Image (cartoon, rainbow, N blue to C red):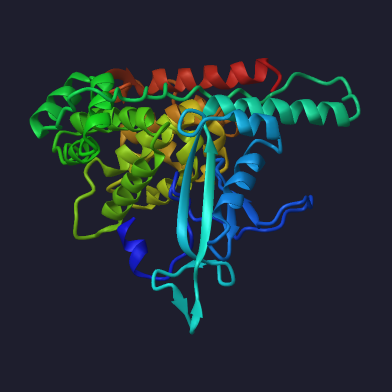
Amino acid sequence: MGGKAEAIVKPWCPFCGMDIGRPTEGIQRKMREFPMGTCECGAVYVSDTTGHNIGAAMVECLVSACNDQWDLAWDLIPEDDYLTGTIEDYDEVTHQVVAKRNLDGRAVRGVLYFVRLHKEMAELVKRFERKAAAQSAPPPTAKGGDSEAPPAAPPAEEPPRAGQRIKKRADKAVVKEMALRGDIDGLAALYGDDRKVLRYLQRLLYEPDAGMRYRIAWVLGQVCGRVSAREPGPVADLLHRLFEACSDSAATSWGMVEAIGAIIAARPDIYGAFTRHLFNFMGDPGTREAVLWGLGEIAATRPDLIRNLPFYALFPVLTHANPVFRGLTLRLLGRIRAKEAGFQILGLQHDATPITLVEQGRAIETTVAELSAQATRFIHEEESNGT
């Protein structure tokens, strides 16, 4: 995020990279000293206007992230249970980060302090919240089961690196060979020694063969999913670089859109807010296929992120002249159980045009008709479950 240090900009989350809202006192007033906010990725942050009370701000932020469970907060261990981050030179009056630390003759010394719980701790806090809500709420009336599907489990967190060991250095040729083999474990472990792994993988996206680009993009997404549990900031920076490359009319976007979709799909709990920005590239014919593939990857783990978009605009793609476009749209609509497009999907059940799609980094031969049948089956399963 080097560019953000040179201008007056909106504050951003150090974990997911998204802009954050202005900290507020909150609807439920408590004995707290600092305005507070929550990022879309789940991080909690507080604002210390003077920058001299960071210790108290850290404690308040951690306790708030634990839903005011003080005993739980004191038992947590940094890095093992939660991540922290700070944004300095924050001006609470204008809700901006001022690199020069002076705005219209007024000193800017504020600090935003962030806490993001790891998955296990976040789930524990949610259980506390549900238990407290159940104790205070009246008994619910008997209705159908809960229609909300549990979120897909994110990739396993990388274990801490041993202190007494010789670190390995990343090499372009080695990274390429490991990527072509699909060695996710090896690449994630190598990143623990050398942060250049992500940059080398990004360079591999400049590949004229479309199938190879999709494979590299999927590998990059899996590696990012593994390392982001402990270091989400560098992956957020990578996403920003990929978006910038896609928006640069003077540069080729080979593999960039595919990689964005793969990264979001690997950790939608952290980077899901980027989905709507990926959807914006549907208007470019050169990136439309990659966007459909990326949205389909995200839909496999978090269909709700797609349903929050204007996905109705995808229905006309089912009649596109390109059979790959039709197939990718069928895959996407089936994964989000889009019964709204049921008739259009059924209309393709006799389209025997063969196509090749990439699933889990591997090329799969199929037909538009097979994808239509699969999408129809997913929709009927949803209806049969009464949801």
Residue 140 visible? The answer is: yes
Is 116 placed left or right of 201 in the picture?
right
Residue 353 visible? The answer is: no
- Quarter assignment of residue 72: top right
Q: Who is closer to the viewer here, 210 or 380?
A: 210
- Counting labels gives 0
Residue 348: image location, x then y, percent:
44, 26
Q: Quadrant of the N terminus?
A: bottom left
Is 385 placed left or right of 366 in the picture?
right
Q: Who is closer to the viewer here, 358 or 223?
A: 223
Q: Quadrant of the C terminus?
A: top right
Tell me which residue sits at (23%, 31%) in the image: 193
Residue 137: image location, x then y, percent:
87, 31
Answer above or below: position of 193 versus 63.
Answer: above
Residue 355: image location, x then y, percent:
28, 24
Q: Residue furthest bottom?
A: 105
Is 172 placed left or right of 250 in the picture?
left
Residue 268: image location, x then y, percent:
47, 34
Is 13 placed left or right of 56 in the picture?
left
